Amino acid sequence: MRDNGIGFSNKTAQLLAGSHPFNRIDILTLNDDIQGTFAKHGIERLNHRVQTNGKWLSLTWRGKNVGLRRLFYVDGEGRKAVEHELFELPKELQGKGISKQVLSSLYEQYKVAGVQRIELFANMDVGGYAWARYGFCTKNRNEALSAIRFSALTHKQEERIVAIIDEHFNSSSAPFPMNKIARLPYGKNALLGSYWEGVLDLTDAQQRNVYVKYLRR
């Protein structure tokens, strides 16, 4: 397996030429957008790196207390997917809209590239709640239940959440949209500090609309 690692430059186009599945991504524009977003908040120009073996594509940005990495690949069924591997922001920069600006820039390239699915692991800090608000789903009932921080809830709240999850899986085999929990008055208590595997099907109009609507809030 060949692994080319270079900075974002005109040479990048050579790596994504021809039959590369993600050759429509405008990496130079994406880099300018992301660097510009961080620059507005006083973050010096980030180190950046492109890696690919001709089939997958990894884009990484690194700076002091800042990290962003996305892995683009084609799954076993031939669908284009991207894994949100990393997004680190220091606490003093959280809540300033940086995440949404960066995610919006990335989403524009997802559309261009024909990405059909986004995958991630919601982390144990704010990610468990934040990614739920973006509309990410868990794949089955057990994963949905394990994502809930029941220790932070009253018995009545716990019963309500279990009922919502059961109602979904009693009538559908589709992944469970975690925003059904996040939008409850006690949804933040239920999900803050949780850890779960999330997926978003961009070919599903309902899931996609939730994601885009939250991006634009």
Image (cartoon, rainbow, N blue to C red):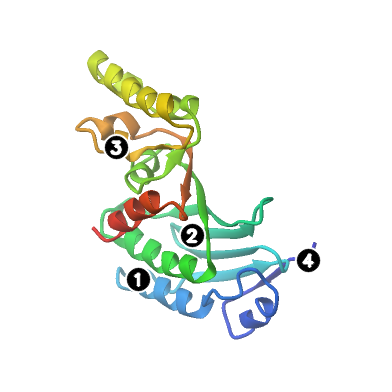
Q: Mark 1 to mark 4: distance in Å?
A: 32 Å
User: Residue beneath label 2, please?
Assistant: 68
C-alpha gap between disc 4 and disc 2: 23 Å
Quick one: label 4 or label 2, which is nearer the N terminus?
Answer: 4
N-terminal-most mark, 3 or 4: 4
| Residue type (three-letter) at the residue carrying disc 2 | Leu
- Is disc 3 surrounded by few (<14), some (14 to 19) or many (20+) residues within 10 Å? many
Q: Residues within 10 Å of mark 1 (few under 14, many from 20)?
A: some
Residue that extends furthest to the right in the rendered view of this protein: 1
Task: Name the image quarter holding residue 160.
Answer: top left
Q: In the image, what residue occupies the spot 46% across and 48% down?
A: 200
Q: What's the residue type where badge 1 is placed?
A: Thr
Quarter of the image for the N terminus: give it. Answer: bottom right
Spot occupied by residue 3 in the image (x, y as percentages of width and height): 74, 66
Note whether 199 is above or below 55 in the view shown.
above
Question: What kind of element bears circle 2?
Answer: strand
* Residue at image point 45% right, 25% down: 146
**Mark 1 sits on what residue?**
37
- Mark 3 sits on what residue? 182
Badges 2 and 3: C-beta atoms under 8 Å apart?
A: no
Which amino acid does the dot numbered 3 rest on? Answer: Ala
The x and y percentages for residue 161 are 31, 24
Q: SS class of the residue under badge 4?
A: loop
Kindly report the distance in space between the C-alpha atoms of the residues bearing marks 2 and 1: 13 Å
